[in-house]
Image (cartoon, helix red, strand yellow):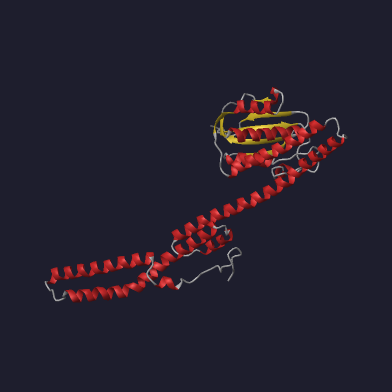
Amino acid sequence: MTHDKATHRPKGRRRPPLAWLLARGIHRTLVGFLLVAALLGVAAGFAIHTAISGWAGVDGTGMACLAVALFLALWPLSWMASVRIAWPLQRLATVAVELRDGALGSRDQLGTAEGPPEVGQVAGALRGMADRVARQLKDQRALMAAVSHELRSPLGRARVLIEMAREGSAPPSVHDDLQAEIDAMDGLVGDLLAAARIDFEAVSPRLIPAAELALRAVAAARLPPETFEAGRPPVEGDVRADPTLLARALATLLDNGSRYGGKTVRLRLSEPAGRADRLRFEVEDDGPGFAPGDEIRAFEPFWRGPDSRPRGEGLGLALVRQIAEAHGGQAGAENREEGGARVWIELGRG
């Protein structure tokens, strides 16, 4: 027999306590129904027998004794039936209380749920909910640890610049350097807030003109308007998305392209082959592209390639994928045949 680490209670089949030998909620109800059924059955049988044979040899006392005899015979059966029904429900209630109190390890007991199939369905749903909460807590702890680590770099560099300024040995670009560190921390906090909105399902999608949003993203990234290409022929339409989150995703794609993608960066609006119900925002560049396997690892939080020269803080493409999946879409990356890389986010049309 194994033990649950969180509650130190044995898992597996447990016997009902002594209190269950007495009448409880479901047991009392079931026994009452059986008693009424026995009385009605005796009365109906006696009436039918009297109507058919004309014999009324059984008096009221005999009928009452027959009803009591039937009740005493059926009581053990009712006890077994009520325990069979109610005990698994009691176990589910106990585990639910433990989960409410934060003992997520108690969800392992749900794998041994017994009783009717409906109880198993409830146990499975409760187990799935507890697994999801545990997974989210684990991801959030990992994210907070990574964010804490990433914040130390710009804070440390800003502290050094401030000390140099106090001593009069700071470089002429000290103000620009401090602004860059502040922008890095602001971007990291913005990514964290966007990820929190997704975790708490605070996504508010609405219809957005795709081309208009792409142009605004290009302008916000301080790139020339010709960076945006609507395709040939031009692709038009709306996407159903949260404006703030989608703008964050496009800003991240453009920022990554400018940092790592070489001299030329393009944001193209396209329609995936065979998917007229979707629109794709693609950011292309003429840089070195991805090393084998990096097009997958690039979507891990805080991942940087081995040859990444510029530093960068933030969730990056991991946040882009989160935003896409929160809208029922997807994100991906690949190398272009003519050189460079292509990173995209694909969403459903409005």
Farthest-out residue, left:
54
Q: In the visual, does 219 lie left or right of 237?
A: right
Farthest-out residue, right:
169
Q: Where does the image place residue 83, in percent across and percent down from the top left?
A: 41, 68
Q: Where does the image place residue 70, in percent across and percent down from the top left?
A: 28, 74
Rendered position, 116 above or below 293: below
Image quadrant assignment for residue 339: top right
Evaluate whether residue 303 shows in this view.
Answer: no
Image quadrant assignment for residue 216: top right
Q: In the visual, does 130 lie left or right of 182?
A: left
In what quadrant of the picture does the N terminus appear? bottom right
Q: Where does the image place residue 306, in percent across and percent down from the top left?
A: 80, 43
Rendered position, 100 above or below 69: above
Q: Residue at x 59, y 65 (%)?
A: 4
Q: Which residue is drawn at 29% across and 73% down?
A: 71
Q: Where does the image place residue 208, in percent across and percent down from the top left?
A: 56, 29
Q: In the visual, does 108 lie left or right of 227?
A: left
Q: In the visual, does 191 lie left or right of 81?
A: right
Total numbered circles: 0
Q: Which residue is drawn at 27% across and 76% down?
A: 69
Evaluate whether residue 245 shows in this view.
Answer: yes
Image quadrant assignment for residue 131: bottom right
